[in-house]
Amino acid sequence: MDDSVGGSGLTDDQLTQLPSRRTPRAYLQDAVDGIAGADPGLSQLRLALQAVLGISVALVLVEVFVRVTGALQLAPGAAPPAAVASVNHALLIVSMLLAGMVAMMAGFTVQDATVRGQLVSSALLPVPMLGAITLGLLVGGHRVLSLVFLVVVMAVAVYVRRWPPRGFAWGMVGFNGAFLGFFLHAELALRDVGWLACDLVIGIVASLLVRFAFFRPDAARTLARMRRSWIARKRRLLSLSVETLDVTDARGAERSRDRLRRQVVRLNESTLMIDAQLAAARPDTAAVEAHRLFDLELAISNCARFAAALAVIGAPTDVRARAADTLRALLTDDVDATASASERLRRVPTPDTRTAVLTSRLAASADDAARARARMDTPVSPAERAAAGDGFDPAVQLFNGFLPGSMPVSAEASTTRGRGGRLDRAALPPYLRTTIQVVVAGTLAVVVGDAVSGPRLYWAVLAVFLCFIAATNSGEQVRRALFRASGTAIGIVVGDLLVHLTGGHLWISIAIVLVALFFGIYLIRINYMFMTLGITVTMSQLYVQLHEFSWSLLVLRLGETAIGVAAVIVTVLLIVPLRPQRVLTTAVLQWFTALRTLVEAVLDRLDGVADDARPALLPLVRGVDAAYAALEATAAPLRKGTFGRNSVQLVELLSVAAAARQYVRSLSAELQDADRQGVPPLTLTLHDAAEQLHASLDAIEHRIRTGERGCFTRSAGLLALTVDDVGRERAPLRSALRDLTLLDGTLARLAQALDMDVRDHDTSPPDSGAVGRDLVSRQG
C-alpha cells in the first residue's frame, strides 16, 4: 500500500526528514537567519557600518586637509622641533576627533526619510555644535562660569527634545560641542574656531559621502530587508515549535512554551515594522499586503500555540510526531507537502476531546499558513485594491527604524497624575521632567566631581547627560546608569591591555577605535554596557595619542563616572520621579483599552450590529498588537528587578496579555472568514453573554484606572448556552465562540492578577486572593 497522502508522493520518513538533512548551506542559512532575525531590517548593522565608515572617511579627509592647509599646526621654528612635532600631532588628533565625532553623530541622528531631508539635517548639524564649542572656549578660562555653562547646556540640550527629531539631534551635538570646548579650552583659542568649523564640515561631508554611496534611503529595499528578517523569525518560531513537541517532561514543556511566547512576540514586532514600512514603500497596495501578512502571521502563531499546548498536556508520542511532521512540511513553504502532513495529523487517533481539538486546529492552522504564504507572492489585483479602500494607517510609527518601545507609554504616564506618594504625583511633559532632573543631577556631579578632580570633572557631567538619553523613566535611567559604570570599569581594563599590546601607533589605535565603536554601536540595543565599553577603549587610545595615558588617569575616569552615575540614581529616585510601576500601569491600561475596543467590535459583529456601524477589525487588531508590544517593552526592565509575589504577578500579567491577544486575534480572523462566507450574526442568542462581558470589561478598566478593587463576573456560563443554541450547522461561529470562551477565562485570570473578586453564573465565588498584592496598580 502506498504510504503517500494527498498525491504529493511524500512518505512518513520523507516528511519527518524534510528540513533535518543538515548541509553546509543549511548551517549557513541558520547563521544568516540568526543575524537577520536578531536585527530586523539589519537596521542596527547598517547604522554601525555607516557610523564607522563615516568616521573612517572623515579621518582620512582630515589627514589630507591638515597636510595641505596646515590647519591648527605650529609653524616650524615656533618651538624646539620635538615640541612642535608633539603639539602638532596632538592638534591633528583634535581635528580628527571633531570630524569623526560629527560624522558619527550624523549617522545616529539624521534619519529623515527623503534625500532632501537628510541633506538639510546634515547641513544644519554643525551649527549648534560650533556655537557650543565657541561658548565653551570663551568661558573655559573662568572656572565657576564654565561649570555653570556645562549645567545650562545640559538643560537646554534636554529641553529642545520637545521638538523632535531635529531638537533631539541639535541637543546631542550641542552638548558634545560644549563638552569639547570645556575639554580643549587650554589647547585651543577663539582664533581657531574657523579651523574647527572646517573640521566639522569635513565630518559632515564624510558622512554624506558614505550615506549616499552605500546607505541611500530606499523604502523598497528597507521593506525587502524587513521581510527577510520576518522570514528568519518565522523559521525560528516553527523550528522551536518542532523542538517543543519533542520535549517529554512537564517542566521542559513549560520552558519551551515560554520560549515560543517570546518568539511569537518578536514575530509580531517584525510584522508591525513591516506594516509601517509598507505605508512608505507601497502606499497603493499596503492595505492588501498588510492583510495578507496578518493572515500568515496569525496562522504561524497559532501553529506555535497549539504545538505548545500539545506538549504541555503531554499528548501521546505519535500525535506529537505527526504534529512535528506537519510543522516540518510547513517550513518548506510547500502547500502540497503541508496538506499531506496535516491530513495525516487529522487522522491520528487521539485519547480525548482536548487533544482532538488541538490536533484539528493545528492542522487547520498549518493549511492556512501554507495558503497564506503562497498568496504573499501573488501580485495585488485591482479588485483587491478596490476592496481594501483608500489609505493605510499603520498602528505604529518607527523610530530610527525600530518600534518606539516604551517611549510613548512613558510620555503618557508622565503627563498623567500618579496615585502613589507625594513624590509620584507630579504630572509634567517628559522633556520638562527630564530637564529638571538633569539640572539637579548635573549640579551634583559638578560639585562632587570638582571636589575630586577639577580638570577631569567633565566625565561625571558626561555620564549624567548620557544616562538620560533613550531612558524614559526612573527604572530605565537607573539601569542605564549602572550599565555605564559597569562598562567603564570593564573598558578601562580592556583599554589598558590594548594600549600596552599596540604600543600607541596612530593607525593601529585608529583601527582599534573603529572596531570598538562598531561593536559598541551594533550591540547597544542588546545592552548599553557594550557602547560604554567601546567609548572607554576609544578614550584610552585618545589619551595615548595626547600623551596623557596612565592607569591612574583611567581609574580617575572611573571615579568621576561613578560620581555622575550616583548623581543620576539619587536624582531620578527623589526628584519628580517617573517610577516604572506608574509607567507599567499606563502600559497595561493602554493595552487593555485597545483590547476592549476590539472585543466590543467583535461582540457587535456577533450580536448583529449593522454593517455600516461596525469598524473594520484588522486596524483594531493591529492596535492591540502595538499596545502589547509597548507593554512588553515597558515590562522588560522590571522582570529582573522584581521578586517574590511581585515577580509572580508580573509574569502572570504578561502571560495573560499574550494569551488574550492571541485569542482575540484568532476570533477576529474567524469572524472575517464568516463575513466572507455570509454567515449571519447570532443576534439574541448572544445578547445576555455580551452584556455580561461588557460589564466585566468595565470592572477591569475601573480597577486599572483607579486602583479600586471590584468584581469580575465570568460570562462563560452564558456563552455555553449560546453555543448550545447555535448548533452544528453554524460551525464557523462555534469556533469563534470557543475562542470567545477562552478569552473570557483569560480575562478572569487578569482579574485575579489584579486582585479582584471573580465570580461566575454556575458556581459560588472562588477565593480571589490567589495572586496577592497588585503590582500594576500599586505605585511607588
Image (cartoon, helix red, strand yellow):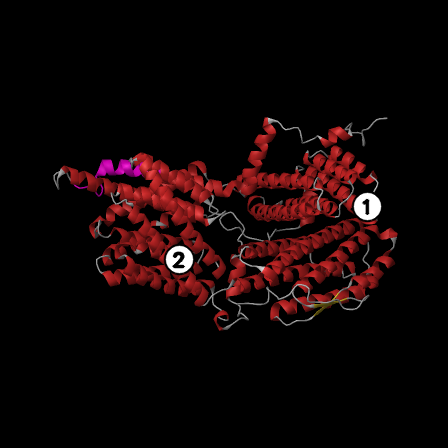
Determine crowd level at label 1: few under 14, some 14-19, many 20+ residues with C-alpha closer than 10 A: some
Q: Can residue 223 be seen in the rendering of this structure?
A: no
Residue under numbered circle 2: 565
> Which amino acid does the dot numbered 1 rest on?
Ala
Q: Is residue 69 magenta?
A: yes
Residue 151 has which mark?
A: none
Q: Residues in magenta?
A: 56-74
Residue under numbered circle 1: 356
> Which amino acid does the dot numbered 2 rest on?
Val
Residue 217 in picture, x, y percent from top left: 48, 42
Q: Nearer the viewer, residue 320 or 615?
A: 320
Disc 2 from disc 1: Cα separation: 57 Å
Residue at 70% x, 30% y is 18
Q: Can residue 495 be seen in the rendering of this structure?
A: yes
Q: Nearer the viewer, residue 718 or 538?
A: 538
Q: Nearer the viewer, residue 73 or 212?
A: 73
Q: Is residue 343 magenta?
A: no
Q: Nearer the viewer, mark 2 or mark 1?
A: 2
Q: Nearer the viewer, residue 741 or 116?
A: 741
Residue at 83% x, 49% y is 353
Circles 2 and 1: CB distance less than 8 Å? no
Determine crowd level at label 2: few under 14, some 14-19, many 20+ residues with C-alpha closer than 10 A: many
Vertical comparison of 670 with 68: above or below: below
Q: Secondary structure at mark 2?
A: helix
